[in-house]
Amino acid sequence: MSEPRGPGGAALVRLVAGREISARVRDKNFIISSAVIIVMLLGILGLQVALGSGDEEARVGVVGGRAGLEQALEAQGEALRIDVAVVELADEAAAEEAIDAEDVDGVLLARGGQDAELLVQQSADGSLQAIVQGAVAQLSVAEQLQAAGVTDLDVPQVAVTALDPDADQDTQRVVAAMIGIGVLYGLLILFGQFVAQGVVEEKASRVVELLLATMKPWQLLAGKILGLGLLGLVQIVVIAVVGVAGALAFDLVDIPGDLISTAVSVVLWFVLGYAFFASVFAVGASLVSRQEDLGTVLMPTSLVLVVGFVVGFQAAADPEGTLATVTSFVPGLSPMVMPVRQAAGDVAPWEIALSVVLMLAAVALIVRLGGRIYAGALLRTGGRTRIREAMRAERI
């Protein structure tokens, strides 16, 4: 009678992945960090709404207004991109009361046959004076032409030709990409730390010895990366959906398709970036046995993320520059730089394909070599393990 067979390799990987997901979902740090990221994103959207709604306004009182004066004031305000509200007042006394009560910014005394006068509390700013002066001049010219019998003027229209009509859309995509890589950077750091902390906790508590009695090191490594990766993917998708929905609800974008494509690009680059950095973080964590030593082995990888984050922001200003172009092909940096280049400029499809291939090759190399280091270092405790020692132990 044959002995019952244990679960296969894929089943063991799924078990580890499910264990990681279950543990992190109950982790207060994970819940708090997720809430903080979403709150920050909503705060950024709210700030954009506040900045976008900050158009300049002017309330102009009018005493003894002539025909067409209100329309002339509003037309001048529109030309200067200022929302003008005209308030009709009975006399000069009412004008002074309105100014004292700050109901109006200024009052135009349009006396018939005399020069107009602008009353203000202390001084008139440039925009208010320009509106009033332009409106009075426009109305005066029209009246004089009419008195001279000129009623039908052939005024040429000025056509507006935009040299870069898509500039606003490009800016929106770049802003979305920059927010995206900010979220991407935070999540890569967060989930990389989760992977590393989990490895050290299992080594310190000797749980890893029990796990390795039933599975191979690569299955444990794959399960950790897969479980936390799925959790991270769900989180960044939720963040992307909240961000896109918020931007559309607040009417912050003109072309929803561009925003959605940028969000999808960031999510896909997260998958590649996470596979790369989670593998590196896990391998690095396997070299130490205490949480206190974790920062030392993870510092080089964290610096790579910081460099990618900084270069990604620089790429927004110069997407075709040498630095942005070269780093968009460098594994580890490309997930932070290429999404910005895609949003800010015309990136050829072959460039994106080459960057993806290089990232996949780097991930495969890290998993192959890092898996050997991980396997050789997991059971070594008592201090920091050198990479050469881990490689030698794995071959024994």
Image: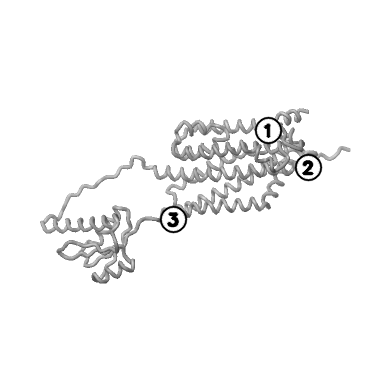
Residue 350 visible at all: no
Name the residue at 49% across, 51% down. Answer: 44
- Of residue 355 and residue 396, the one placed in the foreground of this image is 396
Q: Which residue corresponds to mark 2?
A: 206
Q: Which mark is residue 370?
A: 1
Contact, mark 2 vs mark 1 (Cβ under 8 Å): no
For marks 2 and 1, give the CA distance.
Answer: 21 Å
Residue 232 locus on image (x, y percent)? 62, 45
Q: Nearer the viewer, mark 3 or mark 2?
A: 2
For marks 1 and 3, give the CA distance.
Answer: 48 Å
Residue 207 locus on image (x, y percent)? 77, 43
Q: Which residue corresponds to mark 3?
A: 50
- Of residue 118 and residue 372, the one placed in the foreground of this image is 118
Q: Which of marks 2 and 1 is in front?
A: 2
Residue 268 visible at all: yes
| Precedes in sequence: disc 1 or disc 3 | 3
Q: What element carries label 3?
A: helix
Contact, mark 1 vs mark 3 (Cβ under 8 Å): no
